[in-house]
Amino acid sequence: MTSATVIWHNLWRNKLRTALTIASVAVSLFLFTVLRAVVDSMDTVAASSARQLRLVVHHKTTMTKTLPLAHGAKIAALPGVEALCAVRWFGGKLPNSAAQFPSLAADPDNFTTVYADFALRPDEIAAWRTERTAAIIGAGLAQRMGWSRGQRVTLRSTVPPYVTLEFRIVGITAASAYPNLLVLRLDYLLDAVRADPRWPPGLRDVVHFYWVKARSPAAYEMLRGAIDGLFAQSADATRTEPEESFVAQFTMMFGDIPRLVSVVGLVVVVSIILVVTNTMAMSIRERVRELGVLRAIGFPGRRILATVLGESLLVGVLGGAIGCLPALAVSGRTNELALMMPYFPVLTVSPRTLGVGLAVAVLIGLLAGLPPARAVLRVPVSTTLRE
Amino acid sequence: MSIALPLLYEFRNLRVRSSRTLLTMLTVALVVGVFCYLLCFADGLCRALARTGDPQNLIVIAEPATAESNSAISHEDVPRLKGLAHVAVDAGGRPLVSPEYVVQTNVTRRDDDSGAGVSVTLRGVDLGVALPVHPQVALTAGRWFRAGTDELVVGHAATRQFTHTTIGSTLDCGDRTFTIVGVFRAGGGVRESEFWGHFANVADAYRRSMFSSATVRLNSADPALTAVAVERIASAAIALRGLPEPAYFATQTQNARVLQGLATTLVLIMGTGAVFAAMNTMYASVVGRTREIGMLRAIGFSRTSVRLGILAQSLALALTGGLIGCLACAAMILLDHSTKDLVGTTTFTSVAFTVGLSGANLLLSLAVAALMGLCGGLWPARAASRLSVVQALRTE
């Protein structure tokens, strides 16, 4: 009889107990994997923005205060700037609908260069460049609203001056970092704003952000300080920050929740280690005498340790597999609320997250089996036989 | 005849298998502790929101706007609002309508070393009218800002959670630098997370020429009266949107509801795991004393009393665990820095709130523990009561 057979048979001696233990490991690991996925998805967005060498320039005290259009030319003239994209918050809403999603107006000429990671097709880029009413949307938004390429939609802005514009969707991006975004052309928005004389001039020739793509990592580091220096004495001082820290502010929309989620995940794992240790201890205690017999007839302690550990490992791995795989079903779901946020990622259970879940399952199995296995080996054989 | 098993017997049974009992208790304690904390967290936020809404006040914003922060209303709108019926007046006969500027500034969290900014609300008001309109607002330290100076007062909750909030410190706002001169309370509501300054100075610093919103105080909180005012504000003559304060604040922080949903889901899943653990322990306890149970039955204890005895044992186990969890949670809230903040989904500004311990949440957590004990004990208890007396007595 091989060790594996022994382990397998031992495992099912008490079917109910084993089933309950595997079930509790599975339940906890399901929870753990989903919680990890939330935190990991947020990190993925930050990591992908870090690769883009993009800086965000916004007003020094708050990102909601506007900057003059004139700042753009001055930033673009700096050495090391590959492309500059002015962006104005649009905050569009469908009339008579509660659905919300983030929408931004971006520079028509440079948007596709600065945001190369939107990965648009050449025909989509061409349409964006030539059509004034062009709009590009994230795949998640397209699916949710049932919008397709070529469709016309009318949105009303929720920020002053509340203009209503009609768009034609020319492109849908599958980039996972921008699932809910709608991007429109800045010139189209500014013309509409200028046409309305009711609003003060302060609302006309302004934007909210400048996105700066640097030519090289060296230029990126240099620009981080240089841009703010340019406007330090101006009436509209700026603050330049890496895109990932800017994005982090949006994922922090949920305040302390990501941290809370990590802690809860940890607690779940600790409590499940307790449960499995408990069960293993119970099952070993019932077999003290039998294990004593094995030792008495010459089985080495190592082999007995391996049998016990193997059993608890099997519980961990079976539970892990049953728990982690259904977590994949959660992948791709987004919360209705998350859809309002710019840069909130689609919840993705990545192979890495799944790997972490399974590794934790193995760890649970090992940690839970070790104390009872060692305890049984510490008792002299003669004592165990007498029980 | 059914005689109940002495409870003491059941509790002593728990002690016999002490390490297993302790581990199960600890599992229940962890689950209940986390549940209790999440409840208190969500509750703290809801309380802050609930305390803000004064049903006698209407917040008036531009029709397409979703919050005060993205609203702009013109100066001509203010006299129109003052002319509404049933607007409260002060001692001097002035109608209580407070036009306000709502802008944002950036601070950092006290316990965060990363330097990540948090957007907070800066409100520009005229104290002469703002204080009667918001009667909850009262100064607790320092003094009010003087009109025409770059001075600010800060809400009490903000002082606990954010930097740049001590009296005498300075804060960059728009094009200017303001000095903090006082601290105010607002009945525990979300306004305690704001900075307030004189309207003219705030407007200048942010080069604003249009008000963000106006708060209209009515004579009474009568819903019929409020509805009439809301309708009048929406009519073509004014064409703005009026919302009673409680309704307005309910829409601003929908995350709170998500948080409560999250807490419930987590506990449901974690609780299932804990029930399995409790069930395992109780089954083991039944199997371990099969003979004893046979004996009890033989000397006249009924199936029901055996069943109830096991259930009581499981309940005691879970309740003790739950109690430990609740105590741990209480200790954590009392010892830890319990002020947290959450960014509103439409305003993008942060609201600081205190994670508060409440008797109701502790009781609810204990109830969850009891439920775990009952679920975990039910089947083992049934199994024990179905044992055949003769066979049980024969077991070694």
Image: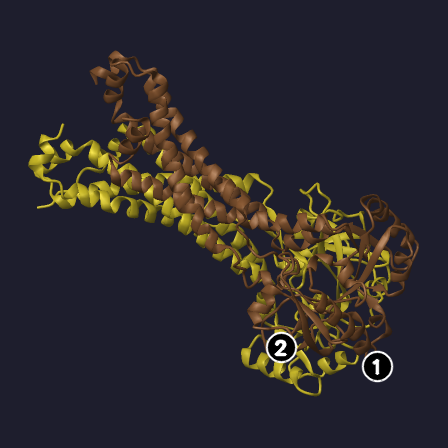
Crowding around mark 1 (Cα neighbors within 10 Å: few <14, some 14 to 19, many 20+) is few
Q: Which residue is mark 1?
A: A197
Direction from residue A326 to residue B125 in the image, left or right: right
- Between the C-alphas of marks 2 and 1, the distance is 37 Å
* Residue B212, percent from left and from top: 74, 70
Q: Is residue B99 visible?
A: no
Q: Is residue B119 visible?
A: yes
- Residue at 25% x, 42% y is B312
Q: Quadrant of residue A147?
A: bottom right
- Residue at 27% x, 21% y is A291
* Residue A151, percent from left and from top: 63, 77
Vertical position of residue A367 compared to residue A21: above or below: above
Disc 2 element: loop
Describe the colour scheme in one phrase: by chain
Image mark for residue A97: none
- Residue at 78% x, 75% y is A188
Letter of the chain that mark 1 sits on in the rendering: A
* Residue B45, percent from left and from top: 56, 56
Q: Colour of chain A?
A: brown
> Where the C terminus of chain B falls, by quadrant?
top left
Vertical position of residue B162 compared to residue A342: above or below: above
Q: Quadrant of residue B223?
A: bottom right
The residue type indicated by label 1 comes to Pro
**Nearer to us: label 2 or label 1:** 1
Image mark for residue B219: 2
Letter of the chain that mark 2 sits on in the rendering: B
Circles 2, 1 touching at the beta carbon (< 8 Å): no
* Residue A12, percent from left and from top: 26, 36
Whether discs 2 and 1 lie on one chain: the answer is no
Crowding around mark 2 (Cα neighbors within 10 Å: few <14, some 14 to 19, many 20+) is some
Which chain corresponds to the colour yellow?
B
